[in-house]
Image: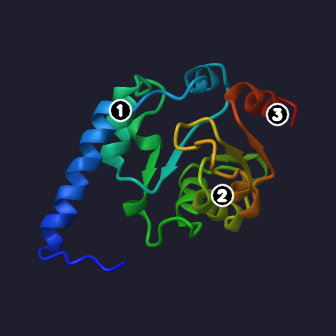
Amino acid sequence: INYNIKDKDKFAEEIFNISNNIFLSDLKLVVGSDDFIKNSNKKHFIGSNSTKERIIKGLNLVKLSNLFLAETVYSFDMVKNPKPEPDIYIKILRENSLNIDETIVIEDSGVGVKAANSAGIKVYGITAGKHWHSNRDKNELYDNGALEVFSNYEDLASAIESL
């Protein structure tokens, strides 16, 4: 389908504004994610294809900003190539002197799983977010290299603790 968009910059700005308004009004904490982080004694980082400002704003909205300091948040604009390239995960590993064999990435998208897998990091998939509607196939995560896919944070936590 070809759309006759006369002013592409204006169109992009309007789409961004609509998206941002939905983000600000509809962003909700994924059930169990806060307990997962609070009950973990592991180091946690965020590697996202969003902007750092938007990630931090989201953390504030869902009241997780006290669990993720700004220096633990990595965004696509901090690396040369965003996901599905592995750059963001390699950057997190290097800047924090993490042992790749002791690192697990938790991802909710195929491109994220592919990025972590390409970096050589064990990756688990999670489908607990509302973007995982009933018609979305979790094989998207398996097909990109997830070792296991979980529908909730309780089962994910149990799997990590059993490693």
Secondary structure under tag 1 reads helix
Tell me residue 37's x, y (percent): 60, 26
Residue lying farthest to the front in this orientation:
1
Alpha carbon separation for disc pair 3 and 1: 30 Å
Q: Quadrant of the C terminus?
A: top right
Residue at image position (24%, 55%) is 16
> First in sequence: mark 3 or mark 1?
1
Q: Earlier in the sequence, mark 3 or mark 2?
A: 2
The quarter of the rendered structure image containing the N terminus is: bottom left
Residue type pointed to by label 1: Asp
- Which residue is at 74% across, 56% downward? 139
Please tell me how crowded label 3 is: few (under 14), some (14-19), or many (20+) other residues with Cα within 10 Å.
few
Circle 2: residue type = Val
Location of mark 2 (residue): 113
What residue sits right under mark 3 in the picture?
159
Q: Give the residue at x 69% y 52%.
A: 137
In this figure, which residue is indicated by the disc labeled 1? 26
Say if mark 3 contacts mark 1, CB within 8 Å: no
* Residue 121 placement, left or right of 35: right
N-terminal label among 1 and 2: 1
Residue in the foreground of this view, choosing between 143 and 106: 143
State the residue in front, 102 or 111. Answer: 111
